[in-house]
């Protein structure tokens, strides 16, 4: 029997509960607050339970050399990588505005303030100090598995479980676009044997086969 997890207040996943769908907006708003609001509205209209954005504190995430390097892509929003990334970042006040808008739309909005659960991206799944700090906050956690080995995921389980039993692993294949033959969905029951508290989901550009307890399609 799969374990049931209360991901948000009153919203359970696993078992016979409906699939929880996260609309991964990320930074596809291109730094435009009105576009972000429209994407929240469309996510709600499509039946998503949650709209997910990405928030970074760039000076803590990148060193000065990385931020100052030239960025000449045709999709660049600035002359340097730092200028490009800053264009895509919303301020804390803008995120609060988006949260108010999302609540009006009856969608749970994920950002750094008062979120119902924490989503750990694949790039941070092997950041054990970060995982420990996040787990100690006591909120439910969704931990992506992209680019991680089974041994690493076992270490994650052993680290998080004693600190916070309310978490699940999200099966993630880090490829864009993701081809059906590369989805590797059969690893889900294997990772489920890591421990009894694991609820499995699927992250990718599409969903195939039976619905898992939690999906995070790219939006």
Image (spheres, rainbow, N blue to C red):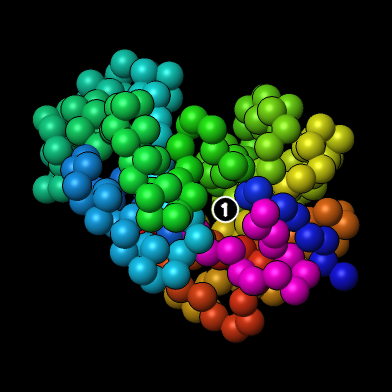
Q: Report the residue marked by disc 1.
A: 146
Quadrant in the picture for residue 45: bottom left
Looking at the picture, tell me which residue is in the foreground, 189 or 97. Answer: 97
Q: Secondary structure at mark 1?
A: loop
Q: Nearer the viewer, residue 87 or 125?
A: 87
Q: Residues within 10 Å of mark 1 (few under 14, many from 20)?
A: some
The residue stretch that appears in magenta = 10-22
Residue 63 falls inside the magenta stretch: no
Q: Nearer the viewer, residue 19 or 148?
A: 19
Residue drawn 38% across the image and 50% down it: 104
Residue 21 inside the magenta-drawn segment: yes
Tell me which corner region of the image, top left, top right, bottom left or bottom right, holds residue 87.
top left
* Residue at image location 29% in from the left, 32% down from the top: 94
From this viewpoint, is residue 24 visible?
no
Left or right of 193: which side holds 100?
Answer: left
Quadrant of the image containing the N terminus: bottom right
Residue at position x 54%, y 33% from top? 114
Q: Position of residue 30 (x, y in %)?
A: 21, 45
Residue 37, above or below 156: below
């Amino acid at each position: 029997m799969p374990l049931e997890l209360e991901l948000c207040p009153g919203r359970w996943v696993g078992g016979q509960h409906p699939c929880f769908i996260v609309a991964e907006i990320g930074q596809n708003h291109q730094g435009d607050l009105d576009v972000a609001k429209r994407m929240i509205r469309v996510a709600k209209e499509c039946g998503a339970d949650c709209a997910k954005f990405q928030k970074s504190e760039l000076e803590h995430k990148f060193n000065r050399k990385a931020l100052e390097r030239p960025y000449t892509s045709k999709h660049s929003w600035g002359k340097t990588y730092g200028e490009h990334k800053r264009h895509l970042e919303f301020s804390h006040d803008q995120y609060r505005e988006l949260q108010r808008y999302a609540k009006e739309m009856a969608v749970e909005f994920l950002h750094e303030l008062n979120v119902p659960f924490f989503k750990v991206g694949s790039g941070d799944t092997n950041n054990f100090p970060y995982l420990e700090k996040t787990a100690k906050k006591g909120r439910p956690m969704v931990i992506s598995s992209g680019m991680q080995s089974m041994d690493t995921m076992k270490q994650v389980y052993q680290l998080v479980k004693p600190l916070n039993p309310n978490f699940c692993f999200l099966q993630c294949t880090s490829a864009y676009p993701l081809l059906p033959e590369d989805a590797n969905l059969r690893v889900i029951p294997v990772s489920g044997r890591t421990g009894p508290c694991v609820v499995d989901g699927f992250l990718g550009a599409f969903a195939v086969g039976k619905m898992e307890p939690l999906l995070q399609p790219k939006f």
